[in-house]
Image: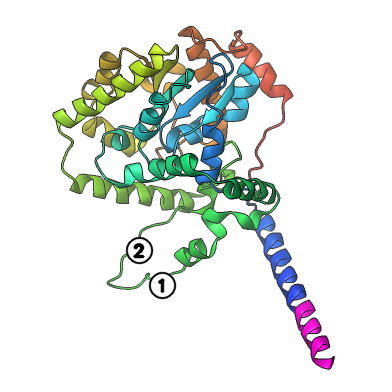
Amino acid sequence: MKQKRLFLKAGILAIVLVSATVIAWEMYLRQQGRGVSYDDGGSLWADKRKQVYEPIDKATVFIGSSRIKYDLDIPTWQKITGDKAIQLANVGSSALPILYDLADDPHFKGKLVFDVTEFLMFSNAPYVNYTPQQVLDYHKKETPAQKFSAAVNHVLESNFYLLDKEEYSLNALLGDLKFNDRPGVYAAPNFPPGFTPVTADRQNYMTESLVRDPNQIKQVTDVWQMLGRIAASMPPVTEGAVDSVIASVKASCDKIKARGGKVIFVRTPSSGPLRAMEKMAFPREKFWDKILKVTGCEGIHFEDFDAIAHFECPEFSHLSVPQAVSFTKSLINILHEKGWKLPSSKNTTNNIASILIKSKPWYSIH
C-alpha cells in the first residue's frame, strides 16, 4: 500500500513538472513574438488537394514554389474576389509533379495559376521533386487514422506556439546549435524563425521583425548564396532539356483546357543580385517567352506590369506581408483585365481598397 502511494506521488510530481515546463515554454515563445504556425506537411497539403474539385467559377488552384506561397495573400484574394484560393505550391520544389497530377485527374476542370521559378522548374536535381512526390504519395495513400490525427493536430496547432515543427521540434532546435561551428566543419545556413511561419491556408509569410532586422535578412540571403553556388557547380540546362520540359507542360495544359479548365502562368517578383543572376542564367526569350509560345497559355510577368514591377523583395526573392497584399490586389486586377471570371467581377482599385480598409489584418506580426 505504501509503495502504491509512493508511485502515485511520483506520478503526480511528474505531471506537475511536465505541465510546468510546457506552460513555461509556451509563455516564453509567446513573449518572443512568434505566432501560430502550422506543419506544412502531407496532411495539410492533402487537405487542400481535396478541394480542387470546386466549380471553375468558385475557386482557383495555385501551384509553384515558395514565391507564390509568400506573394499571394490568401485573405486579400478571397475577400476581394469571393473566390477560394487553393494553395498547392511547395517551397524549394518544382511544380511539375503537381501539374502532371492535376492534368491526369479527369475530375479537375478548374482555374490553375502556375507560378514559374525557372531555377526549380528546369532543374534536374532530385531534391526539386522530393517534396511534391512526398505530398502526392501521402494524398493518395492517406489512411483514416492519419485523417483523424491531422484533425486533432490542426486544433492543437491553432492554439499552441510550441507545436511549430519547423522551428521548435527537437531536430529543429538541435539544428540551431553550434556543434558544427568550428574550423574544418561546414554547416549549411538555416532560415531564421521569422522566415518560416505558415498559416492554415498554407500561406508562408515573413514577420515584421525579420524584415526590419539586417542580421536575419543576411541569414536568409546566405541560404540563397549557398544555393547559387550549388547551381553554378551543376551542368547548365540544355536546350533539348528545356524543350522537353515545356513539351510536357504543354501536354498537361492541353489536358486541363480540353476539360474546360483554364491555365495561366505567373512570374512573381524577385530583385537585386538574385534577379540579375536569373536574367543571365534564364533569359526570358529562352524560357518564359518559350513557355507561353509553346503552350498557347497567357502569362503575367511581373516586369511587364507597372503595378507589380516595382517591388524590392526584403531578401531578393519573396515579398513581405504588406507587399503581398499590394501584389495580390494588382494581380486580381490584371487577371480581371485578361478575362478571368472571378465571383466578384468589379475589381477596381477603389473598391479593393475599401474592402481592405474595413477589414482587420489576418496576421499578427511583431
Label 2: which secondary element? loop
The reply, left or right, for residue 233 in relation to residue 167 is left
- How much space separates mark 2 and mark 1, taking CA atoms? 9 Å
Whichever of callouts 2 and 1 sits on the residue coming sooner in the sequence is 1
The residue segment tinted magenta is 1-13
Q: Is residue 75 left or right of residue 167?
A: right
The amino acid marked with disc number 1 is: Phe
Q: Is residue 62 above or below residue 363?
A: above
The residue at 61%/17% (across/down) is 81
Coordinates of residue 208 in the picture (x, y in percent): 58, 43
Amino acid marked by disc 2: Ala
The residue closer to the viewer here, 276 or 329, is 329
Q: Where is residue 202 in the image (x, y as percent from the top left)?
A: 55, 38
Question: Which label was assigned to residue 234?
Answer: none
Q: Is residue 141 visible?
A: yes
Magenta span includes 12: yes
Describe residue 167's horizontal placement relative to residue 260 as left or right: right
According to the image, label 2 marks what residue? 187
Identify the image's colour scheme: rainbow, by chain, secondary structure or one colour.
rainbow
Left or right: residue 32 versus residue 140 is: right
